Image (cartoon, helix red, strand yellow):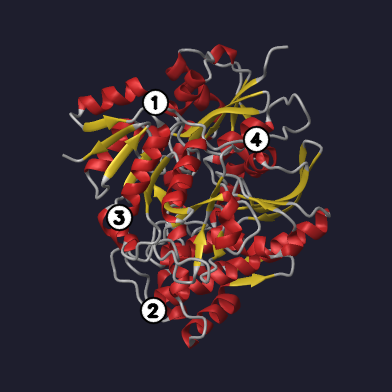
Amino acid sequence: MKAMVVLGISAYYHDSAAALVKDGVIIAAAAEERFNRVKHFKGFPTLACQFCLSYASVNIEDVDKIVFYEKPFLKFERIIKTQINYSPYGLNTFLSAIPIWLKERLNMRETIKKEITQIFNYTPDDIYFCKHHLSHAALAYYTSPFESCSILVVDAVGENATTSIIKASEGRIKAIKHQQFPHSLGLLYSSFTYYLGFQVNSDEYKVMGLAPYGKRDSDEYKQYKETILSKLVKINNDGSIRLNDELFTFMYGERMVDDKKWAMLFGFPKRESQAPITDHHQNLALAIQDITEDIILKMADYARHTIGLNNLCVVGGCGLNCSAVGKLIENSQLGSVYVPFAPGDDGGAIGCALYMSTFNEEKHPVLHYPYLGPSFNDLEVKMALESENAKYEYVSDSETLYKVISLEIGRGKIVGWFQGRMEFGPRALGNRSILADPRNTQMKDKINSNVKFRESFRPFAPSVLEEFANTIFDTREKSPYMAATFKLKHDIVDLPAITHVNKTARIQTVSFDFNEKFYGLLSTFYKQTGCPVLLNTSFNVMGEPIVCTPADALKTFMNSGIDLLVINNFIVKKQ
């Protein structure tokens, strides 16, 4: 029987991506930004589509279904209703958006057909569509270890839903309940991202990283929290919320909030992007982070009781809030918690393809690895190095490579580590990573300032040998995708470079089966130092996507404070 081949596409909002699935198995997937080097690129994923088909050795004529990750008509209906409800506000914004919708988005079927025709010189018979939250839910369920579970989808907004509770069992997913726009936890959090001077749909994690610098015992924090709960949002027992729309403008404008009204509420103006960060900003970030965690805990508890299943998947953009996910995992009443490797919109490309796929079984019980992008053989790497006249040596034996690089890391060197297939999703999971010694007290500041060129308050994540995770960190759970933060057990080991100010870290647990080469390096570092942990941050600098090709890696290596570059078994040094 011929395998069913599905091409999934997410595009036209942010983080566009493509994925190819055969009979329910993910063969290839990548975000467009990795190829065209435009971070959070929102256009059509042309290069990602080409990669997926090429890697799978599939011709476009052999693709059974091309699926888009949301339903444009439903989204347009919400936009029209919003304009009517909030008229005359936002009329200019609406009028500027209408030509785009009429030209390419309202008839998305023809738009996608034209894109596919331009790429492959072939016009597909039809284009299929999957609801946005079902795309998220399908990614979570079909990559999870669960046969049955509750799914909590929390993001800014899909077509109209902002939060969905979904039941998954016997290989099927079914929506149970929705929260509707504009009452959105994701948009509430993004409003504070905007007010704190960060970029919406990009820098929400900076708010999360800033929050632990706030002081819960301060009057200012308590005042901010009370203001949010009394003026901005009402929280119900089931975790559903209602925003005071008189104080928000994202429904109809280009800004998230009314700056003047918020300045009166909180006593300070919106922070400009390059302005210093003060106690006000830290305490406000902590207030909204704590409120967000409380809301997500309520949502998860309600989902568990409503559906009657202990296992929980969390997905959607808010699934990237690893502090909130850590709180969910700490709450043992919730059972096991799973967050997929790409809970945001890029993952929707995989999710919609899985949703439309035919499975050989009701649900594949195998682990779906996040290493779904391109890889490069030694000849390709050598050609890239020699084209740039790079100084390198080749180590044929991997065990020797691990020993050499582990010694360099232990001596304080910062290493760019480029191996195998590129990860899908926002986290570097050991194939496109920058690595360093987590015991080094200067390493956090050194990498932030000299390598990543980013804000000093930003923390770094640790990768830890899976068998040592619960010895060093306060968790019993595996965390292969860096989905959650956990407390460190400081009576065991001191790791200042990966310990955030609140004594937590967003961990990645690494097993031999999950990533053999990264596990080998970690194991060797442990044998040499007694420390089974490495600092692991994404192989990029601020404002750029994670590197994809050897050429990308060389460019970042030469233009930053990285000391050594390792691509496959090539060791590159700066001249």
Q: Which amino acid does label 2 sit on?
A: Asp
Q: Quadrant of residue 396?
A: top left
Residue 463: tell me if it is visible. Answer: yes
Pointer 3 or 1: first along the chain: 1
View extreme (left): residue: 575
Q: Which amino acid does label 4 sit on?
A: Cys
**Disc number lying in front (3 or 2):** 3
Mark 3, residues whose alpha carbon is within 10 Å: few (<14), some, or many (≥20)? some
Q: What residue type is labelled 1?
A: Phe
Mark 1, residues whose alpha carbon is within 10 Å: few (<14), some, or many (≥20)? some
- Name the image quarter holding the N terminus: top right
Q: What residue type is labelled 3?
A: Gly
Pointer 3 or 4: first along the chain: 4
CA distance separating discs 2 and 4: 44 Å
**SS state under label 4:** loop
Mark carried by residue 130: 4
What residue is shown at x 59% (from left), y 17% (from top)? 63
What residue is shown at x 31% (from left), y 53% (from top)? 452
**Disc number lying in front (1 or 2):** 1
Pointer 1 or 2: first along the chain: 2
CA distance separating discs 3 and 1: 28 Å
Q: Is residue 24 positioned above or below 99 on the image?
A: above
Mark carried by residue 376: 1
Mark 2, residues whose alpha carbon is within 10 Å: few (<14), some, or many (≥20)? few
The image shows residue 360 at horizontal and vertical percentages of: 75, 24
Which residue is label 3 attached to? 412
Which residue is label 2 attached to? 279
